[in-house]
Image (spheres, rainbow, N blue to C red):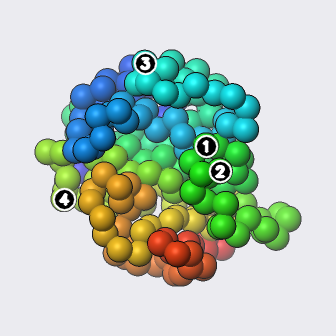
Amino acid sequence: MDMEIKKLTPALLEDYLRFFETEANADNPDPDWYGCYCVCWCSADHRLEIDDSSPEKRRDLAIQYINSGIIQGYLAYAGSQVAGWCNANTKSECLHCISWLRFMTSVKTTEIPESKVKSVYCFTIAPQMKRKGIATQLLERVCKDARDEGFDCVEAYPKKTFVNEFQDFMGPMELYKKFGFAVYDELEDIYVVRKPLK
């Protein structure tokens, strides 16, 4: 399926919010986290006290984060409608976001000093648009832009065992294999996979 992939900017804020309020995570079995707005994977410093305890508070954070470039990634459009989202940001800038602090502290973060790593944290595809190659097109754009921007590699964190589509938001291992990612590290329940860009 042909999609238009757009890098998230403040000009796309309303589209982003609408997507997270209608289509994104519609299959989330946890009603308390419906409306995540992807605020937990970003370059904010969550060692500071930040209240993200409700969809309304997460929405306010998303507005702030998008306007300041703290949340980064890509929206996939089918016509005028957002059909998917991929959160991708500079790894070294996201080591203090709440999800990294909660779940990823075992991932290696010592890099060659000049190395730049782009991390893929999340895919969210509208339910009716799944299995149409949208995640593939989003990942292709992430890799292209990361190469053009001088990153050394793209890194991602797929689960070892499929749980369900909501919990496996980092994308399936098969997707990364198709793009030439290889296992760089292995944790208890995830692989750390990398694709060199140089």
Mark nearer the N terminus (1 vs 3): 3
Above or below 134: residue 154: below
For the residue marked with disc 2, what is the amino acid?
A: Leu
Task: State which quadrant residue 119 falls in.
Answer: bottom right
Q: How many marks?
A: 4
Mark 3 and mark 4 lie on one chain; the one further toward the N terminus is 3
Residue tagged by mark 2? 101
Q: Is residue 8 left or right of residue 1?
A: right
Quote the CA–CA distance across marks 2 and 1: 5 Å
Q: Earlier in the sequence, mark 1 or mark 4?
A: 1
Measure the C-alpha gap from mark 2 to mark 3.
23 Å
Image location (x, y in percent) of residue 160:
41, 75
**Which residue is denoted by mark 3 in the rendering?**
56
Disc marking residue 193: none
Given the image, on which type of amino acid does mark 1 rest? Ile
> Which numbered disc, 4 or 2, marks the residue closer to the eye?
2
Rendered image: mark on residue 131: 4
Residue visible at 25% across and 44% down?
29
Residue flagged by tag 3: what amino acid is it?
Glu
Q: Quadrant of the N terminus?
A: bottom left
Please state the horizontal and vertical placement of residue 58, each as a whole percent of the image.
48, 26
> Callout 1: few (<14), some (14-19), or many (20+) C-alpha neighbours within 10 Å?
many
Query: Helix or strand or loop: what does disc 1 sit on?
Result: helix
Please tell me which of labels 2 and 3 falls first in the chain: 3
